[in-house]
């Protein structure tokens, strides 16, 4: 028991938590933008997968991890525009479009992967750097947990801060939230809610693309495998709902997912790996059930207050 606890509360577990949480957090903070704009973006898993492939393909084609990231971000913008075209411009059902995007991404990236890399997937492309900072060696526990993480981990922290400030401390963030909550009021003020929805969709496409690049060029150091998003987009959507579309809270929810993923790794010596791999997704389901029950409870309390009044 002591051995298990020492493994759970270790620098290695912290490192695994941060490493596992990063792609989910990147997608979640983008999903928070579309959620504020009144769009339920269930297509984030497809966006992540597209970013993972085109990041790897860009690195393979152009010979550099940063160039691969640039190509993936460009594709992420295009995918965000395509999503907004159907949802905002053509008024299509966002849930159906999101599911269609996920299915399309699996088929397209699978076909392109076989065509470009062969049936065994892409391996050995130029990756993004993992940082080893000397000053971290002097910080007990935390220093070891932060060593060797991809540069995209630090970019994620910066993006969480920037998007939080954007949403809650700028006029454009106020417009974004109004586009989802009170679009007619925003339109009366002379600002197009549809424009803010387009911007939100593009931002989500960018962060999901970076999440995909983290998987292929960051975590796996220059390798691509079919369907490597592995339902992280759905987990990210759960984090958005659990965190009330607040980028900082969504990041904390992603950290919780990452911790339980790391916990599953620690438990593999005692429990079947097939079962431990399901732990993060079981926790995600519990998160969603909690959110639903919390929402129902708030509605009941609000209804009682209205009756008393």
Image: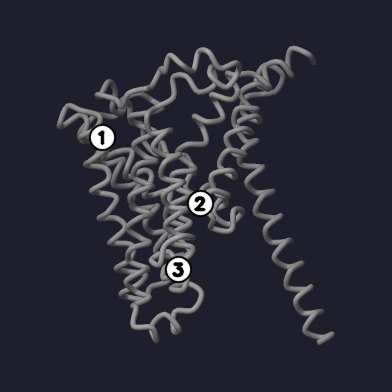
Whether label 2 touches label 3, CB < 8 Å: no
Closest to the observer, 281 or 245 = 245
Q: Position of residue 147 (x, y in %)?
A: 47, 19
Mark 2 and mark 1: Cα distance apart in space: 36 Å
Residue drawn at x 29%, y 38% is 53
Whether label 2 touches label 1, CB < 8 Å: no
Q: Position of residue 2 (x, y in %)?
A: 78, 13
Of circles 3 and 1, the one toward us is: 3
Disc 2 target residue? 247
Where residue 275 sits, quadrant-wise, is top right
Res. 100 mark: none
Q: Is residue 13 left or right of residue 39?
A: right
Disc 1 target residue? 114
Q: Is residue 42 left or right of residue 141?
A: left
Q: Of callouts 3 and 1, which one flags the residue occurring earlier in the amino acid sequence?
A: 1
Q: Position of residue 274 (x, y in %)?
A: 62, 29
Q: Position of residue 102 (x, y in %)?
A: 40, 52
Q: Which residue is most to the right?
A: 308
- Which secondary structure, mark 2? helix
Disc 3 target residue? 174
Where the N terminus falls, by quadrant? Answer: top right
Considering only vertical position in the picture, is 67 above or below 16? below
Badge count: 3
Residue drawn at x 36%, y 49% is 47
Residue drawn at x 39%, y 37% is 155
Closest to the observer, 290 or 163 = 163
């Amino acid at each position: 028991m002591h051995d298990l606890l020492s493994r759970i509360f270790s620098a290695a577990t912290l490192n695994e938590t941060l490493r596992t949480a990063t792609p989910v957090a990147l997608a979640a903070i983008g999903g928070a933008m579309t959620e504020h704009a009144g769009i339920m973006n269930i297509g984030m898993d497809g966006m992540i997968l597209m970013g993972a492939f085109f990041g790897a393909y860009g690195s393979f084609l152009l010979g550099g991890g940063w160039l691969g990231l640039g190509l993936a971000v460009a594709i992420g913008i295009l995918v965000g525009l395509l999503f907004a075209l159907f949802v905002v411009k053509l008024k299509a059902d966002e849930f159906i479009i999101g599911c269609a995007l996920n299915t399309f991404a699996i088929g397209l990236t699978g076909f392109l992967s076989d065509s470009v890399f062969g049936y065994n997937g892409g391996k050995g492309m130029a990756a993004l750097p993992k940082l080893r900072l000397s000053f971290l060696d002097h910080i007990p526990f935390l220093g070891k947990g932060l060593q060797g993480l991809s540069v995209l981990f630090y970019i994620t922290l910066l993006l969480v801060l920037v998007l939080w400030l954007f949403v809650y401390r700028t006029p454009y963030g106020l417009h974004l939230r109004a586009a989802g909550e009170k679009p007619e009021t925003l339109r009366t003020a002379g600002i197009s809610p549809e424009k803010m929805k387009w911007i939100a969709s593009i931002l989500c496409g960018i962060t999901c693309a970076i999440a995909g690049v983290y998987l292929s060029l960051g975590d796996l150091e220059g390798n691509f495998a079919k369907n490597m998003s592995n339902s992280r987009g759905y987990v990210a959507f759960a984090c958005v709902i659990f965190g009330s579309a607040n980028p900082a809270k969504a990041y904390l929810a992603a950290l919780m997912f990452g911790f339980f993923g790391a916990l599953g790794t620690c438990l593999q010596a005692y429990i079947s790996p097939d079962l431990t791999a399901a732990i993060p997704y079981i926790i995600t389901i519990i998160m969603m059930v909690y959110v639903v029950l919390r929402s129902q409870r708030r509605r009941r309390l609000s209804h009682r207050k209205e009756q008393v009044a």
